[in-house]
Image (spheres, rainbow, N blue to C red):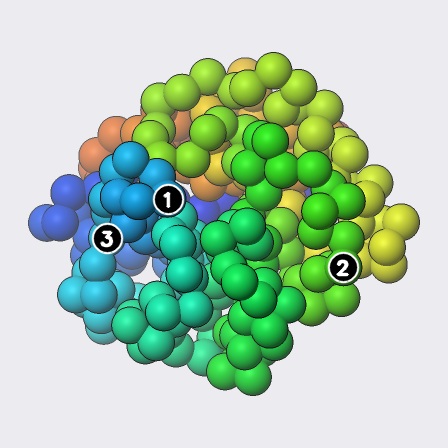
Amino acid sequence: MPIQISPSIMCAKVEEFYDYCKLAEKVGCPFIHFDIMDGHYVPNSALGTQQYSDIKRITNLPIDIHLMVTNPEEYVDMFNVQAGDRVAFHPETSKHPFKLLQTLHKRGITAGLAVNPGTSLPYIEELLVETDYILDMTINPGFGGQKIVPGGMEKIKRIRQFLDEHGKQDAQILIDGNTVIENAKQMYLNGADVLIVGPSTLMKGPDRFEELYHAYKSTIDAVK
């Protein structure tokens, strides 16, 4: 399957939201990546309820929410996440992660698990039956611009094998962290389905997004 690319709207200026969303629609991005940080689970804060509402008005693309928060259950209601959108949370932040996955499905939301560099795969095994996708963090969550952690590339392979062994062949692997072109090629070869991109790759201004997107995607697609 060709690689898919999702822009991280956190990396855009507020006045660029509209342009980036419309460009993402034009080039065929599957969804808009939307980071929520609480300043507690990670030492940073990002994107609130108003930004979510604004982007929902701008685009019909699904919003791919990454909850970097404690008590993620509270945020699903706080943001009034809509059916058709996507939510990935860190299972260690929830008292009842299996129940939260079920709750997301009942609301018509695609449910994912965010996996930190230090999260072992057996830890999420019992959750896979209710899991639609994995958001693999190849950096420590909270800040962009970091280098891939040691073993980050190899872990993508292990996640793909782990999913396949548990009958989850259709579950996508999203990669968040240092998805520059040199790394992106190997991420794709190792089993990545979707790359989350920011200013180090494509988001260097709306006027350049379309050109950079096509160059980036075609280069990665060419490696298979």
Q: Label 3 amino acid?
A: Leu
Q: Label 2 amino acid?
A: Glu
Looking at the rendered structure, the secondary structure element under dot 2 is: helix
Classify mark 1: residues with Cα within 10 Å, few (<14), some (14-19) or many (20+): some
When asked about the image quadrant of residue 159, the answer is: top right
- Locate residue 188, reporting x and y percent: 66, 32
Left or right: residue 102 versus residue 56 is right
When asked about the image quadrant of residue 205, the answer is: top left
- Locate residue 107, reporting x and y percent: 50, 82
Looking at the rendered structure, the secondary structure element under dot 3 is: loop
Instruction: Say which residue appears at 58% left-offset and 58% top-offset.
Output: 112
Instruction: Say which residue appears at 70% left-offset and 37% top-offset.
Output: 120
Provide the residue designation for mark 2.
Answer: 126
When asked about the image quadrant of residue 158, the answer is: top right
Q: Label 1 amino acid?
A: Tyr
Instruction: Tell me the distance, in whole angstroms, between the alpha carbons under discs 2 and 1.
Output: 23 Å
